[in-house]
Amino acid sequence: MEEFAVEKRRLQELGGSLFISLPQEWVKTLQLKKGSELVLETGQNNQLCLSPVKAVRTLRKTRTLVFGKYLHRELIAEYLFGTEIIVVEKKDSFSKAERQQVFNYTNYLMNVEIVEETATKITIQHFHTEDAPLKMLIQRMFFLTHTMLLDLSAAKTKEEIDSILQRDMTVGKIYLNIIMHLRSFLTGRLLTKEYSLIDILDLRLLIKQIELIGDEIKGLAHAVLEGQKYKREDINFLADKYSEAFKSYVEKNVVVAQTFWDSEKRDKERLRHNEYLVRIYMHIKDISDLVI
């Protein structure tokens, strides 16, 4: 069943009460039956949200994948779906390099560990942390990228830049973890009264911009290693603008967001000597645009 399937149904009357039948595929997917309890929530614009009392944590407990060219994509798909146990199999024995490859893929995901290994099978477990506050994860994502930017302005050694690159890996992990949370809200696997569909859409756009900022900082760090020059005051300027944009989003401060529109042309002219700085600035401005 598609996540956003839409269909029309007519209200029926029985014994003086109105009722409507539930989509059969929805009932089957959530494993509902006669006597199952449901929660009815009235949202904005008189929308009615219907969810099981006990949200189904995962629709698929175990999944077996065959080691191959697209394993990385398949692992991410299962992670986002919320699969608890992922078994990677290979007809022949895994080589040392192939085992390292699976380890590297696993290391890219939050709360995922290899729990069992045999010659032809590697078992991966996803330890769910769906109770982790979503706001805390987003704040952590912002903090990491913001400190990456600040530290880059003072970085002088390869070790300091390597530390910045390592933090970008953590940003990627948190990004996927947040997406898993948002998908759980949308599919009913995790109940929430805190976020509307519009909130979830905005949060998805927000974390994408933060993730892109991390990617650009990583690219700039690599360029610095290769000898590219930049003005330290420009990095500090971007860090301040980043703080302003994120704070304006959190506080829904339209006045602060509007300052980005007024100064955009001037700011881009200041940073035009470095394409990475310009792109970072544009992602920061895109965050401020979400306030409206």
Image: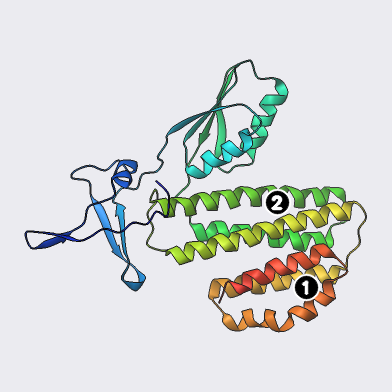
On the image, the x and y values in percent for residue 114 come to 57, 30
Answer with the quarter of the image where residue 71 lies: top right
Q: N-terminal of the two: label 1 or label 2?
A: 2
Q: Is residue 55 above or below residue 60?
A: below
Measuring from the top left, give residue 168's x and y in whole percent: 70, 51
Which residue is at the front of the view, 171 or 280? 280
SS assignment at label 1: helix
Position above or below: 94 against 191: above
Left or right relative to 171: residue 177: left
Residue 8: percent from left, percent from top: 30, 59
Quadrant in the rendering for residue 230: bottom right
How many discs appear? 2
Give the residue number, with chain letter if any, for mark 1.
237
Residue 77 lies, in percent from the top left, at 54, 41
Answer few, some or many: residues within 10 Å of disc 1's Cα (few below 14, many 20 plus, some between 14 and 19): some
Q: Residue visible at 57% across and 44% down?
A: 110
Left or right of 11: which side holds 245?
right
Residue visible at 42% across and 36% down in the picture? 60
Q: Is residue 218 visible?
A: yes
Residue 248, label in figure: none
State the residue at coordinates (69%, 25%): 98
Q: Which mark is residue 168?
A: 2
Secondary structure of residue under mark 2: helix
> Which amino acid, mark 1?
Phe
